[in-house]
């Protein structure tokens, strides 16, 4: 049974060669991000992942979290693994050194996050949620709140949770009904939240919940929600956890996957009301939520890469070992990796993963410059690029993760359907990624509404121009004709689809919604394909030079070519669907379904 | 919680209006297939499905089959449901009246099969396997074997099982190692078989296994395997079940889905050897297997339709009930069916299902004429068409069933990931369909090798010509311009891809394998799209006439249009991948994965 090996070579390529690590390391506070540091960090993370987290992945599935009374108990072994994780400094790695963090940029912390997610997706959600809480606290918390909670969340001594959803308020936060009533320096919260990932467990002394609720005088809709910090245990003046707050998990969900991650229904204020502290301004909860959500969305996109990589490694191992049938030109029975159709599946998985990883990396690069660039123009441009990429990273990577993990099952044949093999777990685990932190439909709506229509397509036009310049570079290389042609056709499709949206939305209010999914997938595909084109150019240059690692660069050109030949043609299909507009989408009356 | 309602209206459309039911009813032995009989049969089947089978579906998932000692026990309730099923004459429905069957043609028995599969996929596999055993016995069994076993299998008094796979022999039957040693009028079998669906249970007094094994003097490879009938209980001279044969289930698999269907590891001959009877000639097991397999493959394709329909009904119900968010042009909060992106998902599911169902129906029509046509030319042409369609039905319908059942989860949002909702079960159950009875890769290999290359593309050319004549009919209808254009582009793609295969395979032995999947998906898509085009033409004619059911025909034109606009564009993408040939598929060395 294969374990997980962090794909550090490709991660280094993305971070050091594809992204501008040197530029990022030149930003204030990012000086630690030297290539050799990055290398060492990835290797060390990979070791913890292979030796500690990956071996617990199956146990988390079989022996998932359970609830007893008011307490959730995590999978045996997770607590000790978490201790090693936090004590190794891995929880603090992505945070500013000003807050006790490792001070590493996103171009480094993203691949590290992928390693945790690939090794043990259910486990990795816990630090991911902590990170979201830290982000909200850093951006919006008062100095007092920061003083009391921040360093413990950064170190991982305590974990965080994000409490947004209610039964009637899923994608639609306007319907949030949880109440918060002021009382002195704090508030009393009452209400119920659902789908609270790692909402309770026994791994740490405290859990810090970030809860959306509504003040008594709040306006209706999303403009009336506020964010509150609600600790599981109230914190004493000396910083130690004191009495238990009036909140408790009332049940955990029986889910398709990620059984090791407790998904809690949380009840607040069964008695006197849970004590909470306002984060940010009153009625400004939505903005605070987006602070948490933006990074969480990127991380769920990265999760799509991580779980895909895990599925790929398992399938590749099986394909090399499993002897079955004969193959053209080979004598006797062969390992199934020799069969062209199995090779097609492996190449599809691999080139998608490399494309996803590259896409996530340039989103990380944009995040780093958006957060730390001294030049305001660069900062602003990076922010705009990041905003455009977030839905593409989240939406496209998680949708394609469904395909990749399903191919992982398929390569195993009948064994793939048998749970003991492990391929099915990745397939089940992956299924949540297109749903939580905003469904694919919500990402698509974000892309067309907030990211394209709102600025009249300006940033999309800038992206398209950048892609075209890579097309031109590819055109200069004779043997990249197929890469050049297919990327050009694909970016033409993206341009045409964007123009259609901008034009047609004025005539038909259903256009944006009807075309949004196809435009989202088109954006993700073309942007990833662009990065694969850039990767091929870089690899070729390395091969022309001295190039110590010829096989890596040769392989990279092959996966880029496969991506262009087998995946990019989908771009025209997405565009054709966009150009069909809303007519046949909306023609049936709702009661006819 | 919605139950299952058989989509009898669309089934009737496919059987009576899209397929040539009248022509089929004119074939010898098929006289019963009058339109009103078909209607009554579908309604009655739908009632049993809704009232008896569908309510047990969830129970089969939660409380699946279990093994104790040498006996497998099915889900409680399945035995009683099976008794009603068999006593109602449903098991015998598809068989010739000469053997005690209902004498109904495939264009009728296929939608009936879809009903069982939609209602309870795990349950439906049992009669499906019985049917395979009957087919083998009818085609290849001696009069003595038929006399002893046939009527009981036809009636459903006993069930059948198909024992092909061994640990080292999955897709590759050349590696079958089970042994059969002659002893008087029978054989003694020893060996182990895996993945034996409904290999043991307590629902009937006997189970008739059809087992592939190898005689002592057998040549190596597939030309040395023979088929044996091996009953669980030896049959006394009076026809009653006697002593237990030397065979037993040794374990059942812990699977991703279809928990209600026991998947057995069967051991034969732990003691003196299991007694078996040769079916057909010695060493001719492969031909016998294909007799069983052809129909089983069609049924697994139909299963893709059935499970998709079930997922669709659940998602449509949820979308109409779940209130969330606002929608352009609507006041207040709306049911999510009002959101254009949810509508896109529902339309994708629905138009795929209608396309799949139409494809299965014309395969059934071809089967009926291939089996019963008096005119030898018609018989031969129908057989050739059927042979071409089998891999498309199996491969395309089951692959698209993955998309449809996944969309079923997606429409439910977070609820879709919670097992109690039921959407996740359909998603898990469906996952086997691309694997058993020959993986998608095997279907693809069958299509390119046995169905295209072997006859030099003749039958594919005939199919393409038929599709083109529908394109021409569409061109005559002004407002079907989009249907005409997209079907034309798609059939051009199919023609080009086929020509590429025929041409290129001579230069590069990897071509067939490398392009096979994309060509398979292209064939399924275009053929289904063709039928949707025909459906639109029929619907339009009915609307022009008196047309008692206007809304059905209006809706049919909408789904046909959606299929053309949103799904057919995929054809060029498949073709582009085909035209890329094997180069980037095969370029990486096996040890680089």
Image (cartoon, coloured by chain):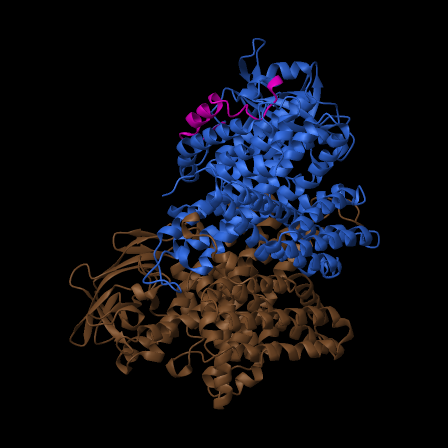
Chain colours: A brown, B blue
**Can you say whether A57 is above or below B300 in the image?**
below
Given residues B206 and B521, the one toward you in this image is B521
**Can you say whether A542 is above or below B392 in the image?**
below
Q: Is residue B88 magenta?
A: yes
- Residue A307: x percent and y percent? 52, 60
**Can you say whether A90 is above or below B156 in the image?**
below
- Residue A31: x percent and y percent? 50, 85
Q: Which residues are magenta?
A: B71-98
- Residue B364: x percent and y percent? 62, 34
Given residues A22 and B380, the one toward you in this image is B380
- Residue A161 located left or right of residue A452: left
What residue is shown at x 41% (from left), y 45% (from top)?
A: B422
The quarter of the picture where residue B137 lies is top right
- Residue B281 located left or right of residue A520: right
Given residues A411 and B216, the one toward you in this image is A411
- Residue A134: x percent and y percent? 36, 74
- Residue B86 located left or right of residue A272: right
Residue B216 shows in this picture: yes
């Amino acid at each position: 049974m294969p374990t997980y090996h962090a794909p550090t070579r490709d991660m280094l390529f993305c971070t050091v060669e594809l992204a501008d690590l040197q530029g990022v390391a030149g930003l204030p506070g990012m000086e630690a991000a030297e290539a050799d540091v990055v290398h060492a960090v990835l290797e060390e993370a990979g070791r913890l992942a292979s030796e500690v987290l990956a071996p617990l992945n199956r146990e988390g599935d079989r022996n998932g979290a359970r609830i007893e009374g008011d307490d959730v108990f995590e999978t045996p072994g997770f607590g000790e693994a978490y201790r090693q994780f936090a004590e190794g400094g891995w929880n603090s790695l992505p945070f500013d050194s000003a807050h006790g963090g490792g001070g590493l940029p996103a171009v480094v912390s993203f691949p590290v996050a992928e390693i945790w997610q690939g090794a043990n997706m259910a486990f990795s959600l816990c630090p991911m949620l902590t990170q979201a809480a830290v982000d909200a606290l850093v951006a919006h918390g008062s100095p007092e709140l920061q003083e009391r909670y921040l360093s413990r969340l950064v170190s991982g001594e305590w974990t965080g949770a994000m409490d947004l959803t209610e039964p009637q308020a899923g994608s639609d936060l306007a319907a949030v009904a949880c109440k918060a009533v002021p009382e002195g320096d704090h508030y009393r919260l009452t209400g119920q939240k659902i789908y609270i990932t790692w909402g309770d467990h026994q791994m740490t002394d405290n859990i810090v919940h970030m809860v959306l609720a509504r003040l008594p005088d709040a306006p209706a809709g999303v403009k009336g929600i506020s964010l509150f910090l609600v600790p599981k245990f109230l914190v004493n003046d000396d910083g130690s956890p004191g009495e238990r707050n009036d909140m408790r998990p009332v049940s955990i969900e029986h889910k398709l996957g990620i059984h090791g991650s407790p998904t809690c229904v949380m009840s607040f204020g069964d008695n006197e009301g849970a004590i909470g502290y306002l984060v940010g301004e009153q009625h400004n909860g939505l903005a605070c939520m987006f602070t948490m959500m933006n990074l969480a969305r990127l991380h769920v996109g990265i999760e799509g890469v991580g779980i895909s990589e895990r599925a790929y490694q398992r399938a590749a191992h099986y394909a090399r070992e499993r002897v079955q049938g004969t193959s053209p030109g080979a004598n006797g029975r062969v390992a199934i990796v020799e069969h062209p159709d199995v090779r097609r599946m492996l190449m599809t998985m691999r080139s998608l993963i490399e494309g996803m990883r590259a896409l996530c990396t340039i989103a990380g690069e944009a995040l780093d410059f958006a957060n730390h660039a001294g030049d305001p123009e660069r900062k602003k441009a990076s922010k705009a690029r990041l905003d455009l990429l977030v839905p593409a990273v989240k939406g496209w990577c998680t949708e394609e993760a469904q395909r990749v993990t399903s191919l992982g099952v398929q390569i195993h044949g009948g064994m793939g359907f048998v749970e003991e093999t492990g391929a099915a777990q990745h397939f089940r685990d992956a299924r949540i990624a297109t749903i939580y932190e905003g469904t694919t439909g919500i990402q698509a709506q974000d892309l067309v509404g907030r990211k394209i229509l709102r600025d009249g397509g300006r940033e999309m036009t800038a992206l398209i121009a950048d892609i075209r310049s890579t097309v031109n570079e590819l055109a200069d290389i004779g043997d990249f004709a197929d890469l050049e042609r297919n990327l050009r056709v694909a970016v033409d499709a993206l341009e045409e689809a964007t123009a259609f949206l901008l034009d047609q939305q004025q005539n038909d209010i259903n256009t944006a919604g009807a075309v949004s999914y196809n435009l989202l997938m088109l954006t993700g595909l073309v942007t990833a394909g662009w990065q694969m084109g850039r990767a091929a150019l870089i690899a070729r240059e390395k091969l022309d030079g001295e190039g110590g690692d010829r096989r890596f660069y040769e392989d990279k050109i092959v996966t880029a070519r496969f991506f262009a030949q087998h995946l990019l043609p989908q771009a025209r299909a997405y565009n054709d669907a966009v150009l069909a507009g809303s007519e046949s989408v909306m023609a049936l009356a709702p009661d006819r379904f």
